Image (cartoon, helix red, strand yellow):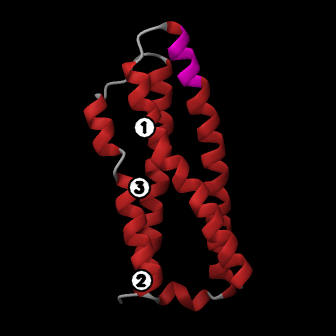
Amino acid sequence: MIWVKAMHVIFMVTWFAGLFYQARLYIYHLQTTDEEGHQRFIVMERRLFIIMTIGAALTLGCGFWLLALQPLYLEMLWVQTKLALVAGLVLYHGYLWKIHSDLARKKCRHSARWLRVFNEVPAIGLILIIVLAVVRPF
């Protein structure tokens, strides 16, 4: 079980690195004015999204594996809360793809300021998830 936990944390770091940087790329993308820069950002965002999605899938896979090994965890409130936060991050991840698609079509309705605030969501999620997993407050 300890190896599965280690893999879970490693893949989670990969996922979060992508979550932290993807919205930052969108801010830079919004600020570009030339077509060459626009196309470059589309490629960079897509590639990062692929790597981030692999990290997310492996994180979730290892998480479900851990729950299969210890199904009693599902009865614990801290695990249920953690899973709710993870579900929110999965939705956030999906919304990042929508923003990417909008930027690629030059139809993004969000400002750079909005994206800066939006970029803080995974940090809050990470803090809460780590506190839940380590401290297990309830």
Amino acid marked by disc 3: Pro
Amino acid marked by disc 2: Trp
Residue 37 x, y percent position in the rendering? 52, 15
Residue 114, which numbered label?
Answer: none
Residue positioned 49% across, 49% down in the render: 19
* Cβ atoms under marks 2 and 1 closer than 8 Å: no
Residue 75 x, y percent position in the rendering? 48, 89
Q: Say which quadrant the C terminus sits in.
A: bottom left
Mark-to-mark CA distance, 3 and 1: 12 Å
Front of the two marks 3 and 1? 1
| Pick the front one: 121 or 67 | 121
The residue wearing badge 3 is 122
> 119 left or right of 74?
left
Circle nearer the N terminus (3, 2): 2
**Residue furthest out toward the top:** 35
The residue wearing badge 1 is 24
Residue positioned 49% across, 54% down in the render: 90
| Pick the front one: 82 or 124 | 124
